[in-house]
Image: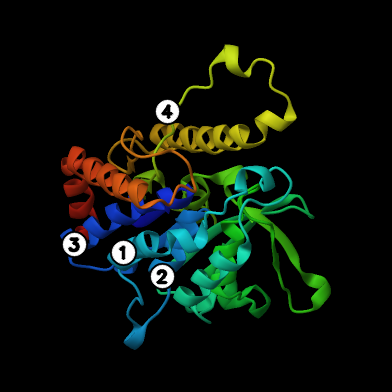
Amino acid sequence: MARILSIDGGGIRGLIPAMVLAEIEKSTQKPIVELFDIVAGTSTGGILACGLCVPGAEGKPKFTASTLVDLYLHEGRRIFPYHLFERITEHFEAKYPSGGIEQVLHDYLGESRLSEVLTELFVTAYDIERRKPRFFRSRDARQDPAKDHLLWMIARATSAAPTYFEPFKLPGVNPEDYEALIDGGVFANNPAMCAYVDGSTGPGQVRPEGVLVISLGTGSQNRPLMYDRVKDWGQFQWTKPILDVTFQGISATTHYQLEQILGEDHYFRLDAELTLASDEMDCASVDNLRKLQLQAAKLIADNANMLNKICALLATS
């Protein structure tokens, strides 16, 4: 059975799937790369995917999922630094400088390349100059050195959310071969369908009954956009809300599609309604990090039976 893990985008809320994955590793006593044939991610999910698959000493994963929980807890403020005038400057330039997130990603992922990952990796981004989706696939990197990019650069590209960070200029073999990339969430905030299609089509096609997809969300937003408040909004007011609407709508649509295609025995989705923590992608305050931990703990407790079934299936697949 082809085992696929998919992790949504969602900024600092990636703490939630990181804690779910730590619970899976604890229950199975195995690292994620030994449990899944493909690990896919978008944005913060792409960062997690790269972190879970990066090699360490003696062919073992460099990080456990628990270690990546600590990334959010200890590095959140370096990625999303608070500054006094952010509410003014964010309307005229990217809300955050890229130096913080790039340093964190390089610290964790180092000089490891896509071809070196310990299981198949699938990460999304979007090329704004060529106007098309960009898929980073480890199998492509092993076949073509030109596609064998540094993991920290892939993680930076997939998490370049418009309005939050500037696009990432991914260097090519020659200077003129660069790619201008932004967050893959603009078309695949939930990359589960992309990963399913990529892992189950082509030569040796796998039928739906031969696939197991575990899809992890980063928490669904629950603040309504009331008609009387938004009916007269223009481009300026819609800039950030429409990004949130797009990301959440894409995730929900992908969930519906896979639920219909694969059914409850081959597709599992764990996501939380954000009743305790903020739904902001960049709220890295100590208080909200604690609330995100509580939200993840509640998700794990509320879905204990599903998690037990997932772990049993992964252990025997």
Precedes in sequence: disc 3 or disc 4: 3
Compared to residue 153, the image places residue 209 above or below, namely above
Q: Amino acid at mark 1?
A: Ala
Which residue has dot 2 on it?
A: 53
Compared to residue 268, the image places residue 312 above or below, namely below
User: From the image, which quarter does the C terminus lie in?
Assistant: bottom left
| Residues at discs 1 and 2 in contact (Cβ within 8 Å) | no
The picture quadrant where one finds residue 303 is: top left
On residue 65, the disc is 1
* Residue at screen point 28% across, 64% down: 66
Disc 2 on helix, strand or loop? Answer: helix
Q: Amino acid at mark 4?
A: Asn
User: Does 135 sit left or right of 39 as displayed?
Assistant: right
Precedes in sequence: disc 4 or disc 2: 2
Disc 4 on helix, strand or loop? Answer: loop
* Residue at screen point 62% across, 43% down: 87
Q: Is residue 211 visible?
A: no
On residue 26, the disc is 3
Which residue has dot 4 on it?
A: 222
Compared to residue 83, the image places residue 153 above or below, namely below
* Residue at screen point 19% across, 37% down: 302
User: From the image, which quarter does the N terminus lie in?
Assistant: bottom left
- Residue 209: give x, y in percent of width and height: 34, 45
Q: Nearer the viewer, mark 4 or mark 2?
A: 4
- Residue 117: give x, y in percent of width and height: 45, 74
Precedes in sequence: disc 1 or disc 3: 3
Disc 1 on helix, strand or loop? Answer: helix
- Residue found at the very far top of the displayed protein: 228
Question: How far apart, in angstroms, are the residues tagged by discs 4 and 1?
Answer: 27 Å
- Residue found at the very far front of the displayed protein: 84
User: Does 27 sit left or right of 269 as displayed?
Assistant: left
